[in-house]
């Protein structure tokens, strides 16, 4: 199971590492991204997750 999600964990670690000195910007950026995106039903998110690995 860990191998299945290894790419995601690595991407998350890289994202956090690259932004480690700008932690104060992280929440506002996340909120902005959430407000700009269209709603997406959970089944669509899960299908995309399975498609991308």
Image (cartoon, rainbow, N blue to C red):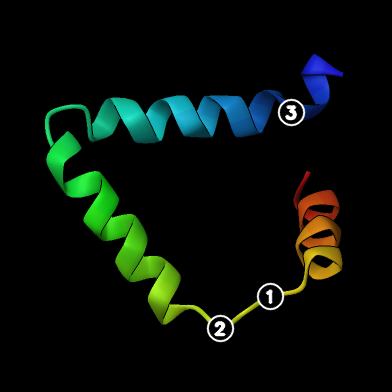
**Mark 3 or 1, nearer chain start:** 3
Q: Residue at x 77, y 52 (%)?
A: 49
Badge 2 element: loop
Whether pointer 1 and pointer 2 mark residues with C-beta atoms closer than 8 Å, the reply is yes
Q: How far apart are marks 1 and 2 (CA)?
A: 6 Å
Q: Say few, some or many: other residues with alpha carbon within 10 Å of mark 1 (under 14 / 14 to 19 / 20 or more).
A: few
* Residue depicted at x 86% and y 65%: 43
The percent coordinates of residue 20 (x first, y second) are: 21, 27
Q: On the image, numbered disc 1 is attached to which residue?
A: 40
31 relative to 19, above or below: below
Residue placed at 28% from the left, 49% from the top?
Answer: 27
Between marks 3 and 1, how big is the CA–CA gap? 21 Å
List x then y, in percent, for residue 2. Answer: 79, 16
Number of the front mark, 3 or 1: 1
Dot 3 surroundings within 10 Å: few (below 14), some, or many (20 or more)?
few
Judging by the rendered image, the residue that carries numbered circle 2 is: 38
Residue located 69% across and 23% down the image: 6
Residues at marks 3 and 1 touching, judged by CB atoms closer than 8 Å: no
Q: In this view, does 1 lie above or below 49?
A: above
SS at badge 1: loop
Q: Which mark is residue 5?
A: 3
Left or right of 8, for residue 3? right
Foreground pick, 34 / 13: 34
Name the N-terminal-most of marks 2 and 3: 3
In front: 38, or 52?
A: 38
Along the horizontal axis of the image, is 1 left or right of 17? right
Label 2 CA crowd tier, 10 Å (few <14, some 14–19, many 20+): few
Left or right side of 28 for 12: right
């Amino acid at each position: 199971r860990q191998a299945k999600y290894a790419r995601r964990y690595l991407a998350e670690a890289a994202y956090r590492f690259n932004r480690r000195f700008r932690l104060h910007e992280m929440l506002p950026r996340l909120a902005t991204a959430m407000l700009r995106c269209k709603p997406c039903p959970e089944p669509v998110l899960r299908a995309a997750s399975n498609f991308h690995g």
